[in-house]
Every structure is written in C-alpha cells, then in structure tokens.
Image: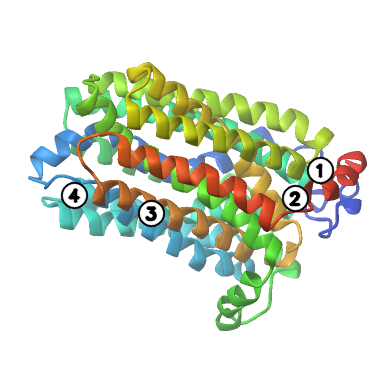
Amino acid sequence: MSSSIPSSLTDTPGPTERREAAGQPDCVPLHMLVVLSALMGLGNIATDMYLPALPAMAQALKAAPGQMEFTISGYLIGFGLGQLLWGPLGDRLGRKGPVAAGLALFVVATIGCALSTSVATLTLWRVAQALGASVGPVLSRAMVRDLYARDRAAQMLSTLITIMAVAPLAAPILGGQIVALWSWQGIFWLIAVCGSAGLLALQTIPETLPPSRRDPTPLREAFASYASLLREKRLVGYALTGGFYYAGIFAYIAGTPFAYIEYYGVDPRLYGLLFGLAVAVIMGANVLNARFVRRFGADRILRAATVVLAIGGILVMVTTRTGWGGLPGLVAALLLYSSMSGFIVANSVAGALAAFPRQAGAASALVGSTHYVMGMLSAGMVGAFADGTPWPMGWIIGAGGILSFTVTRLLLPGISAANASTGEMS
C-alpha cells in the first residue's frame, strides 16, 4: 500500500472554522477508522482488562492496602510523559514511524508485566508500557486533525471513540473471566497479543502527514514550544476542562474495583458487567455528540456537558458519603458522571487543536498529557486516602466535576457565543 494518503485527504484546512466546509474528505475508509480507534483504545485496554484482577494481584504480590493503585498511577505517569515525547516526533517525522516504535515498546513492556514478581517491578514495567501505549491516542488524534478541522474533527473523534469503546466494554468482562479461569498473568499475555496485532494493522493504513506539511522545527525547539502553547489561555482552558473530567474518571477506575468488589461484595466477574455498563453509556453519548455537534457546535455542547458533569460529581459525593441508594445509587451516579465523556473529551480536544494545525501533534500531546497527569494524581490520591470506604473516590470525582465546570466559566467564557456562528457555518 502507498505510504502516503491520497491528496484529497491531505489538503487540510487552516485553523478557522470558515474553511471547514472546503477541502476536506467526507469520510475515510472504514478500516482506517477501525485501526485509528484501536490505537486510541490500546492504552485503555492495558488498564481496563486487569481491573477485575487487582484484588487477586494484591494477594499474589503481597501488596499493602492501597499499594496496587500505584500500578495505575505509574501507568498514568508514563502515559502523560510519553505523549509529550510522541507529539513533536509525529509533527517532525510523520505519524506512522513513531506509532510503530511506540507499539513495539508497548509489547515488550507488557511481557515484562506478565513476568513481574513484585509490585515494584510491575509498576516499573507499567510505566514503560504506558510510554509505548501513549503514542496511540496522541497521534491518532493528530491524524484526525490532519484530515479535518474543528467541528468535523469533533464529529470524527466521537465516531472513533464510539468504535474504540467496544474494547474497554469487553476488556474488564474478559479480564474477570481470565483471572477466574487462568491467572492474572494471562491478562497481560493477551494484552501483548493485542499490541502485536495493532503493530500489524498499522501497516494497512496510509501516512496522513506528507513531508511537505511536516514541522521542520528542530526537536529541541519543538519541545520548547510547549511553553508557548501553555501561554494560550484557550488551549489551557480546553485541556483543563477535559483534565478535571479525567481526574474524576481515573478515580472511578482506581476506586471501583475495591468499592464494588470488597465494600459491596460484587463478584469479580460481575464487576466487568458494571464497568461495561458505563462504557455503553459513554458510547451512546458519543453517538449523540457525533450527530449533533455540527448543528449546535462543539463548544456549546461542551459548556452544557460540564453542568451535567458537576451535578453527577456532587451526586457521587453524596452517595459515597451517606450510602444513599446503596450499590444501585452509587452505580447510577457514576453512570451520570462518566457519560459526559461523550460530550467533553472529543469537543475539548477538537477545540484545543483547531488553532494549531501545524502543531497538531504537540497540541494533542499537551492536552493528552494534561488529562493523564491529572488522572495519575487522582488515582494516587484514591490510594493515599484509602480508608476502606468509597468516600475518597467519591469526593475526588465530585471535585473533578465541579472544577471542570468552573474552568469553562473562567477560561472559556466566550465559547458559547463564539460557537453560535461556527454551528451555522458547519
């Protein structure tokens, strides 16, 4: 297959929404959408599949209370730092080469996880695993931005996330079965196979960033450009809006295995079904976002979604503090919070990347690393404040929803008005 994508797909519009209607493909091949979705979802699979095994792993590795959460935090550290590396590399060298290198590192590190005999060793391999996995979402988002601008990019990102969600929907269910019928190590062996399959699938899609459109800036200066990007108020606003959402969602990921399985006595195999329910709700929200984003505008939907997010976060705080509603009440509140992913993630990423088409990789990396660094901090806080109840998870999720809402009002005060015109032009 040709190493470059057809010219009809590489005439990327500039940063303004007025150019969105011209020069863009209406769609890309289905197999390319599937491959990009798989690359975006690989990092989630590496965490979601082993969540049902955390209590069993804690026993097998003789982990102290709260210690296993640091395997999640370590992963998020690697994921956040890795995106800062791959973004500028992708802008300068093209997308496919760095993706292949990252996937190779992911496979090797995943095998290391399977062979680990202590929490410390497992955590180190998880950091390396995340460094490799982080190439997928950062450069997949950049590839979408190579092809589309703003609202259309948000629509395509929602489509990719919907397809991608099939993996985390099945991953915890499959992980629960593997740990019940085999062992926790078997989960990592299967993840390594998935990474190898992704490396093969990468060869079937074309390069979206031809040499003529690559950033010639030396890598040293490209890395230094993060400082200038951080001075862009709107980019920071979009990054933090998604970042605080991720702080809550990773507190959910770190806290629910123990809240559901140990506190409420849920069977590990049923945990996957509860987790899958949340993923199904997220998929539905992404379908709705893809349908309506070009009518109402990405920013307008983002602003409304943070209101619902804050309400969901407050409800999680109430249920975890008071026990109101028991397990069904907690699940319902968490579903309301997590469902806003469909309206917040794609729209905030598209907004952040819209003004930086030639630095799409670096901007995507900065946004993505913000998301995962904040997720790392919240997952670590769940472990650090663990008290045998769901409350530490609850107040962290509540804070994430409230802060995400606050950021849109303080750093993105004009997005609703600004998007009124772009929604019409789309």
Instruction: Name the N-terminal-most of marks 3 and 1.
Output: 1
Residue 289 image point, x, y percent: 69, 32
Q: Quadrant of the C terminus?
A: top right
Q: Are marks 3 and 4 in contact (CB under 8 Å)?
A: no
Mark-to-mark CA distance, 3 and 2: 31 Å
153 to the left or right of 261: right
Residue density around tag 4, few if under 14, some if 14–19, many if 20 or more, within 10 Å:
some
Question: In this view of the protein, which residue sits in the foreground, 47 or 4?
Answer: 47
Instruction: Name the N-terminal-most of marks 3 and 2.
Output: 2
**Amino acid carrying mark 1 in the image:** Pro
Question: In this view of the protein, which residue sits in the foreground, 49 or 391?
Answer: 391
Mark-to-mark CA distance, 2 and 1: 7 Å
Q: Are marks 3 and 2 in contact (CB under 8 Å)?
A: no
Mark-to-mark CA distance, 2 and 4: 43 Å
Quick check: can you spot residue 298? yes
**Amino acid carrying mark 2 in the image:** Leu
Residue placed under numbered mark 4 in the picture:
67
Depth check, mark 3 against mark 2: the one in front is 3
Residue density around tag 3, few if under 14, some if 14–19, many if 20 or more, within 10 Å:
many
Residue placed under numbered mark 3 in the picture:
376
Depth check, mark 3 against mark 1: the one in front is 3
